[in-house]
Image: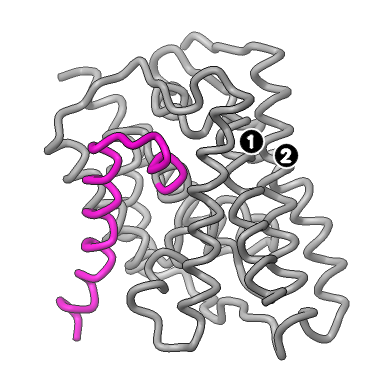
Amino acid sequence: MEIIFNFNDSMRALLGGALIGLSASLLMLFKGRIAGISGIVHGIFFSKDNGKAWRLVFILGLVFGGYLSFYFLDNPFHTELTFSNSQFIIAGLLVGIGTKVGNGCTSGHGVCGISRFSMRSIFATLVFIGSGVLTVFLMRSM
Amino acid sequence: MFKYIISFVCGLLFSLGLTISGMTLPHKVIGFLNVFGAWDITLLFVMAGAILVYSISFIIIKKGEKPLLDSKFHLPIAQKIDKKLFIGAVLFGVGWGLVGLCPGPAITSLSSGSPQILYFVGAMIIGSAVPKLLFR
């Protein structure tokens, strides 16, 4: 096993993480809501409460933040990887189904749930990181 | 109006956190999941930063009776670790590992205008409607 560690990248990651924590804190403080992105996206289309509007506005803020990032980051979305269209679609379907069945994703379980010491979230996070690790391992061996 | 401004600002801060930390770079995410190869541990720091802030603020916020703009806290009630949670997390992890995208970074990356991101997000929304159709 080889470990890649870059101090500057890691400090930026820590700062970015703190911003995510701040965003989740404000959402809980003002609206009493968990900042779980999969649940918020799903709720725009399928929620039965009257919370479609705030969810949509949150998602608009998320996309707008992406645009803003172009002004201070060289290439916020550039990746060294290329995948086929069908791989994106299959991955999207799995993420959509999985986060619905498992009630959360990296943000809802991985950040908010773990911070609340929810056993379900700690378990889910270990499982999805584990299956992600296995998937990457298998894809690399093919 | 104010509650929508708050929602927008929260979304904005969240995505700035994602882009600054490198979560919107699929090769970094896949590097983080590449434990058996060259393991890029950068994203551990994203989780550490977020959990550090939120775990402390959550304790303080929960001392209040209710949120500032709502009548109650909307917290998950499920406690049990069951098969459904396991299966969901496994499927999500496979999709995450396939292209290095989870929901937050995928939505944020819509701003790049990449059609592949659009396919992913479209499939994700459709996918999230599937379980209800199957288990009605």
Q: What stretch is highlighted in magenta?
A: B107-136
Residue indicated by mark 1: B46
Q: Which amino acid type is marked by label 1?
A: Val
Q: Distance between the residues labelled 2 and 1?
A: 5 Å
Q: Is residue A126 above or below residue A137?
A: below
Judge from the rendering whether residue B22 lies leftward or rightward of residue A133; answer left or right. Answer: right
> Where in the figure is residue B32, as x and y percent of width and height?
48, 26
Q: Residue B49 carries which label?
A: 2
Report if the CB atoms under discs 2 and 1 are less than 8 Å apart: yes
Secondary structure of residue under mark 2? helix
Q: Which amino acid type is marked by label 2?
A: Gly
| Along the line of sight, the residue nearer the viewer: A107 or A44 | A44
Judge from the rendering whether residue B113 lies leftward or rightward of residue B81; answer left or right. Answer: left
Residue, x 47% and y 67% (percent of image)? A56
The number of callouts visible is 2
> Where in the figure is residue B83, as x and y percent of width and height?
33, 67
- Mark 1 Cα-neighbour bin, 10 Å: few <14, some 14–19, many ≥20: many
